[in-house]
Amino acid sequence: MATNNYPTPMLDVLEEGPWPSFITGFKKLRDEHPDERIRNVINGLMGQLEHSYETKMGYWKGGTISVFGYGGGIIPRFSEVGHMFPESKEFHTLRVQPPAGNYYTTDMLRQLADSWEKWGSGLQTFHGQTGNIMFIGANSVNFQHFFDEINEYGWDLGGAGPCVRTGMSCVGAARCEMSNCNEHAIHRRLMNNFTDDVHRPALPYKFKFKVSGCPNDCQNAIERADFAVIGTWRDEMKVNQEAVKEMIMKKAKEIGKEGDRSAGRQYMFDNVISRCPTQAIKLNDDDTITVDNGNCVRCMHCLNVMPKALQVGDDKGVTILIGGKRTLKIGDLMGTVVIPFMKLDNEEDYERIVELAASIIDFWAENGLEHERCGEMIERIGLVNFLEGIGIDPDPNMIKQPRNVSYVRTDGWDEAAEAWFNRKREEKAAA
Amino acid sequence: MAAPEMRDPIESGCPDGFQYMHPVMRRNYGLWAYHEDPRPGVLVHVSKTGEKIWTVRAGTQRILDVFTLRKLMDIGDTYGDGYVHFTIRSNIEFQVADGAKVEPLVKALEDAGFPVGGTRNSVTSLSHTQGWLHCDIPGTDASGVVKSMMDELLPEFKAWNMPNRVHITTSCCQINCGGQGDIAINVQHVKPPKINHALVGNVCERPSVVARCPVAAIRPAMVDGKPSLEVDEKKCICCGACYPPCPPMQINDHQYTQLAIWIGGNHSNARGKPTFQRLVAAGIPNNPPRWPEATAIVKKILECYKAGAKDWERINEWVERIGWPRFFEVTGLPFTKYHIDNWRGARANLNSSTHIRF
């Protein structure tokens, strides 16, 4: 064990307690790793982190660094206290795009660990808040070698800066009965169509794609993605009436009233029937349920409670919401419905979603201000200007309620109304 | 001297996850019928073909050293089928096709110090940011806050005690990369930036810094004969947005950085529509290495939620049902002028009815 380690009295406290300790992991690298370079880097890192804990300040500065041929994908970090902790004075993070859906084999992760150990600090995270694998801690020479090595066997950098960012998709059709689309195909089609925009930041600000296979939105797409794809269906949900009956008796048993049918029914009233946001589900006297599918808003609650009894329908597709984002600059914004429903079954459908994304990014690149997210632009110019810019017709599913202030010019009303009736006629003819 | 030969990148983009999925998942892609929860941290999914796949979920420290990563992989090879998946809260999941493997896998994970849990109505791992470990604008640490909090919340991770799932997040500045959560612990700065006027003119692109301010509090100014920027301190909301593009406008301060707690962020559409989190507590000491004051408030909120909410109610729904006055009453948290929204659109957050509980 090295004796010249920086003392870390405050960090040592974080080794106590039952939850896995990142400090214990750091120390193992610092004290036991065969490579002296890694031992030293982690020692420096721990010294600086201890210093942050003691002074309650952060000491990393950004900069500009990228691999040859790209303009992004690396988060450069130079220490402001490099004179005190020279071993880790350059500590850059490589953002690497995970496979769609975050699926790995143990072999792949070992291979990545072997490469990272060769060139970096030996620390990595699955995953950062954007969705990247983060390889944390390479110096200004080695990051290129590490990238070259993993790029040869199939990995590529994600986005950093004003560019299309790494996408995210939920566990999806691979392991979830709620899935309504091929989340991973959508994720890859969208991302890999914009590879150039990922690697060469030239947009007003970041642009994120996230895909959730159902309205439970496990990827937090509506609140965090500029382009949120949410799986949904538009026909009837499937009801297995036998499983409903089974569920009633099972619930009675769970709450300690085995065989008491009315206790099970009460659970259903309290937890399913009365929780439906549109009162679209009814429990009948014979313990079957009736669903008013025309008023079901696909909130997912009843399916979550009774995954065995209720299932999503067959006519599946996606809803697309645009403009979700976090706080900077004008406050948090949710995405807005721009495409209430579209099918994603065949090649043509996939081309359509990619075209939609391209037209949105182009319009925003043209009209967004510097450092303005797509949703902020929509807030500034109004949804209608945005819709006209990307060639999408207005739809009542885009709003919670119509405008309430009477100060509005309506001199194009007749044409707009006519366009609406024409669209309705066309839809009817096409159906 | 000739320039060194550089290698052109292969722009392969996002890898195909399909090839890395468990074969049972590949075979049954899109064919799952339902799932059951045999115990906290374990799921079993049943396909329409009759095949089953078990998932075992465990908490990690999120930032993994290669030794820990290999230990997890060893467990995956010895007790699992060699396939893993990560959730967005950095839980690791092992998939196995044989139910008999579940218990030994759970035991191996627990023995190695990785708690199994975090499914259904438990408190799952915190999603969080980088903090002092890597961020360039952190007001506090992230990994340390999370470690301290999860040490205390471990029983809630490993059991199904909560009315519904609980997502907790932390963020080390007000940009809030950690995102929306049922409970979010975020930094609040309480003092405008300290400006080093000697450096601003040379370091910062002043117009873009002016444009970055959400409340238009920054103006160009000449200070000591040098071009610089000044801040209207009455307008300033201490968000720190000017600091990344202009480091001489230092927002972080060991004394004036506190934590705040927000509740009710919920990104699901289940029952209600997605919601943003709301401020409930601020002025909490930024107190490394354990941040006990923040954890105590989180535990108090969880305790009240557990006692007061109905099955399936998320925190936002519970508060919506009982009303905010009651929330402050049961948690014992003070209600102050800082809770009253004054951002754009604030009036939509005020009560314009006589719906009042007495």
Image (cartoon, coloured by chain):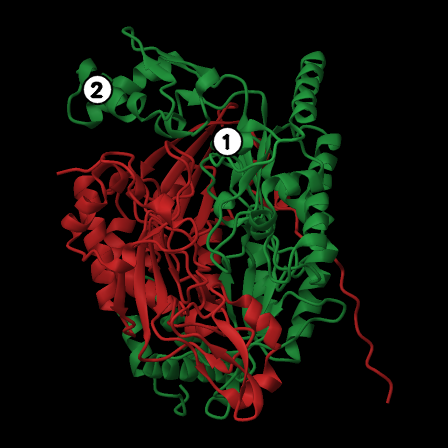
Query: Which residue is located at x 25 percent, y 39 percent?
Result: B318
| Secondary structure of residue under mark 2 | helix
**Residue A18 in sight in this render:** no
The front one of A215 and A48 is: A215
- Residue B308, compared with residue B257, is above or below; it is above
Residue type beneath disc 1? Pro
Residue type beneath disc 2? Gln
Would you say the residues marked 1 and 2 are in contact, meaning their CB atoms lie under 8 Å apart?
Answer: no
Q: Which residue is the site of mark 1?
A: A402
The front one of A132 and B233 is: B233
Nearer the camera: disc 1 or disc 2:
1
Q: Which chain is disc 1 placed on? A: A
Relative placement, left or right, of B54 versus B199 is left
Relative placement, left or right, of A252 versus B218 is left
Query: Which residue is located at x 33 percent, y 83 percent?
Result: A54
Same chain under badges 1 and 2? The reply is yes
- Residue A138, compared with residue A239, is above or below; it is below
Q: Tell me residue A177's x, y (percent).
A: 48, 30
- Tell me the quarter of the picture where residue B56 sits: top left
Q: Which residue is the site of mark 2?
A: A266
Instruction: Report the quarter where the N terminus of chain A lies.
Output: bottom left
Query: Which residue is located at x 49 percent, y 52 percent?
Result: B77
Q: Which chain is disc 2 placed on? A: A
First-in-chain label (1 vs 2): 2
